[in-house]
Image (tube, rainbow, N blue to C red):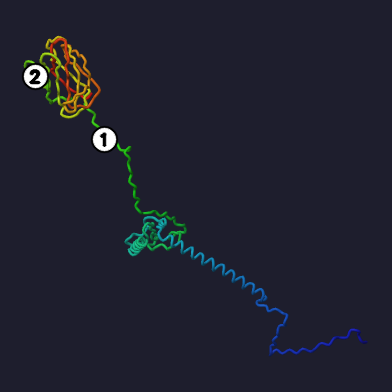
Amino acid sequence: MESNNPTPHRPTVEYHLDEPQEVAPSPGSHVRLGGLGVTVWSIVAVVAVLVGGVFAVQWATRSDDSSSQNSSLAGLDVRIPQPNATASDAPSPSAHPSATTSAKATVSSTIAATPQGQPSVTAPTSGSGGQAPSGSGDSAGSGQQAPVDRPTTSAPVSEAPVETTPEDEEPDPVDAPNPLLDLIAGHLAKVSSQGWNLVAGNITDGDPETYWEGGLGFPQTVTVDLGESASVGRLVLSLPPNMGWHSRTQTIAVQGSPDGRSFSTLKSAATYTFDGKANQVTITFTPQETRHLRLRFTGGVGWWTAQLSGLSAHAS
């Protein structure tokens, strides 16, 4: 009995094991490498190129910054401290003479290469005697970052001269006149007249018992040249003391002159009393500069002429 579904015809396939057959890909199929398509590999290649370019730019920038930093640090004195070590572990200079010589040479060359006005930078040698590697921020033999000393300028600082004003300067001390100094001492007196042997020299001889007496009548004058101009403000006049003289008065004016010819009044005429004991009077007035000093006697009570045994002149 025949079936309504006829059996399809199956072609006979022959297999040849000794000759492998190449199967060409169909036009619509994609080539796959390592399990990935060509499109995926193209994208990966583009990404790799971009990433490589970015890394190249960063590396170039980092190199420029590193070169600039190394150039700016060329004049700095970077001191890298030695690692903690006991005295027994520290190498002696005699144990490593070559290392010491190398370190000194490095320091000398660094200082010589430093421009004037910039601080010098020198890295000390490591604990093993060798020079510390440049740019390593750690001290030799330790993983800790070495502290860096701040550079200090060695250029001398010149101090500007301090100018003083006349107000700041102290004035030269001026010697004040000595009120005890007798300006007449050592100088001779001149008188208008004298009686008996009572001469003008008795006025300035320093002996209170000797005195001058003028001729009969008034006025009478006594003049003394001080030798140079001086400030005069006080006169002391005396008669012989304790000689049993009775009290008497004399009217006297004080005059002064710079040249001995023209006299002006320093103290107007006044009456002074000699008590017969101390027999001394003091005449004061405003101190004035004068060289020639004159006493002008214009009257008296108790004796009929002028008398004087001592005369001293003072600044005040």
Identify which residue is drawn at 33% across, 60% down: 93
Residue extending farthest to the right is: 1
- The Cα–Cα distance between marks 2 and 1, rounded to whole angstroms, is 45 Å
Name the spot of residue 252 as percent of width and height, x first. 19, 17
Foreground pick, 205 / 121: 205
Asked which quadrant contains residue 240, the reply is top left
Q: Which residue is mark 2?
A: 199
Element carrying mark 2? loop
Mark 1 surroundings: few (<14), some (14-19) or many (≥20) residues within 10 A: few
Quadrant location of the N terminus in the rendered image: bottom right
Foreground pick, 176 / 297: 297
Asked if 193 appears above or below 1 in the picture, the reply is above
Residue extending farthest to the left is: 197
Q: Amino acid at mark 2?
A: Val
Identify which residue is drawn at 21% across, 23% down: 264
Asked which quadrant contains residue 296, the reply is top left
Across the whole image, how many numbered discs are drawn on residues? 2
Q: Amino acid at mark 1?
A: Asp
Asked if 101 appears above or below 185 in the picture, the reply is below
Left or right: 282 as drawn, with respect to 12: left
Element carrying mark 1? loop
Name the spot of residue 316 as percent of width and height, x first. 23, 23
Name the spot of residue 104 as percent of width and height, x first. 34, 61
Q: Which residue is mark 1?
A: 172
Asked which quadrant contains residue 99, the reply is bottom left
Label 2 vs label 1, nearer the camera: 2
**In the image, which disc is placed on residue 219?**
none
Left or right: 235 as drawn, with respect to 77: left
Name the spot of residue 156 as percent of width and height, x first. 34, 52
Foreground pick, 6 / 230: 230
